[in-house]
Image: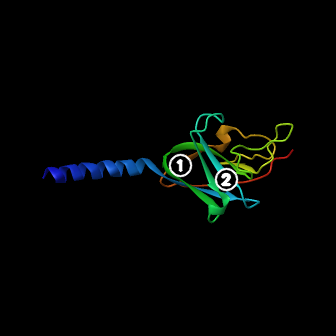
Amino acid sequence: MIHLFYTLIYKVTDVKKKKSTGDLRVQIENLAAAGGAINVALFQHDWLTPMRCENFPVSFITQNAVVIEDLPYGNYAIRVFHDKNCNGKPDTNQFGYIKESIGYSGDGHARDAIPSLDACTFTFSEDNDVVKIRMCTPRM
């Protein structure tokens, strides 16, 4: 009887846990070149402090998408860059402009400048678990 009680408590706790997190599918459009890695950074409050950062080798990406697993539901902004030389950071030219392909969630466009966090913020939930990112090479 006690074993049954603990099993029920565990299952109820497990169900609550599953409803508070999920897997976010990041669909990457316009990925120009093979090789290197895709760096996906999630932000909540500002562009300076990513709350989570993951790297995916380009050779492992299927259907131009990556999955961020076990992410708490909430509001996020995403920055994706194609780290062609796998040095862990966006490469810049002598003027500080990013040379590697980069993309942002939402309506953020990276062609001329870093978009605002508000323009890139979206709500991740059970019903909204896919976000599309269009990669582009910034103008120099």
Q: Position of residue 33 (x, y in %)?
A: 76, 60
Left or right, residue 43 beside residue 109:
left
- In this rendering, the count of numbered labels is 2
Left or right, residue 65 beside residue 11:
right
Residue drawn 63% across the image and 48% down it: 40
Please state which of residues 116 and 53 is positioned toward the viewer in this rendering.
53
Q: Secondary structure at mark 2?
A: strand
- Alpha-carbon distance for marks 1 and 2? 20 Å
Give whichever of discs 1 and 2 has the lower sequence position: 2
* Residue at the extreme bottom of the image, as rendered: 63
Q: Which mark is residue 124?
A: 1
What's the residue type where badge 1 is placed? Phe
Please state which of residues 38 and 102 is positioned toward the viewer in this rendering.
38
Please state which of residues 38 and 10 is positioned toward the viewer in this rendering.
38
Residue drawn 59% across the image and 34% down it: 45
Q: Which mark is residue 49?
A: none
Please state which of residues 126 and 24 is positioned toward the viewer in this rendering.
24
* Residue at the extreme left of the image, as rendered: 1
The quadrant of the picture occupied by the C terminus is top right
Q: Position of residue 117 (x, y in %)?
A: 66, 38
Left or right, residue 5 beside residue 78:
left
One can see residue 127 in this view: yes
User: In the picture, residue 57 is in which quadrant?
Assistant: bottom right
What's the residue type where badge 2 is placed? Ile
Q: Which residue is mark 2?
A: 38
User: In the picture, residue 59 is in which quadrant?
Assistant: bottom right
Could you classify mark 1 by the number of other residues whose Cα lies within 10 Å: few (under 14), some (14-19), or many (20 or more)?
many
Q: Position of residue 137 (x, y in %)?
A: 80, 51
One can see residue 61 in this view: no
